[in-house]
Image (cartoon, helix red, strand yellow):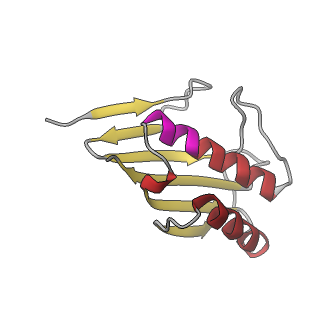
Amino acid sequence: MSTIKTYNHNLWDHGITQGYRVNDTIYISGQFSHDKEGLFIGEGDIESQTRQTLENLDRVLEGFGVTKSNLAYVEIYLTNPQEYSESVISLFKEYLKKHRPAGSLIGVTYLAFPEQLIEVSAVAHFD
């Protein structure tokens, strides 16, 4: 029998949940730079957007009772990787500390919102 649990921040309904656990695997939808009320944070500022996006990733992980040390795979989407990848990678390494999940950094033409520069999705494991 499968164990299934979802996590939602209840800010809006785009037809997906923020996190979906099946047995010991947690699938985390793309997180971006918004506060707890759903207001966009950091327009034009990749460092501010990255920090807020990672805080939102932490919030989803906490909703399942795990931490960033449970991350197994991370995808980072950037609208301008040539300009932003160095600072984003630095902030991401600072966020992870010594943990090193598998992952990809993917350049994209645009994301869901015009002011959005970064999005992060992930797969984590449940202990």
Q: Residue furthest left?
A: 1
Q: Position of residue 31 (x, y in %)?
A: 60, 46
Q: Residue sitting at 76 percent across and 32 percent down?
A: 39
Q: Position of residue 18 (x, y in %)?
A: 50, 37
Quarter location, residue 19: top left
Magenta residues, as a range? 58-64
Quarter location, residue 20: top left
12 or 88, nearer to the observer: 88
Q: Does any portion of residue 108 appear in the rendered image?
A: no
- Dominant secondary structure (helix, strand or loop) of the stretch shown in magenta: helix
Q: Residue sitting at 43 percent across and 37 percent down?
A: 65
Q: Position of residue 17 (x, y in %)?
A: 47, 34
Q: Is residue 36 above or below residue 41?
A: above
Q: Residue sitting at 76 percent across and 68 percent down?
A: 87
Q: Position of residue 50 (x, y in %)?
A: 71, 54
12 or 100, nearer to the observer: 100
Q: Is residue 34 above or below residue 88?
A: above
Q: Residue sitting at 47 percent across and 55 percent down?
A: 69
On the rendered structure, is 60 left or right of 80? left
Q: Residue furthest right?
A: 44
Residue 84 lies in the magenta stretch = no
On the rendered structure, is 72 left or right of 37? left
Q: Does any portion of residue 96 appear in the rendered image?
A: yes
The quadrant the N terminus occupies is: top left
Q: Is residue 85 above or below residue 65?
A: below
117 or 108, nearer to the observer: 117
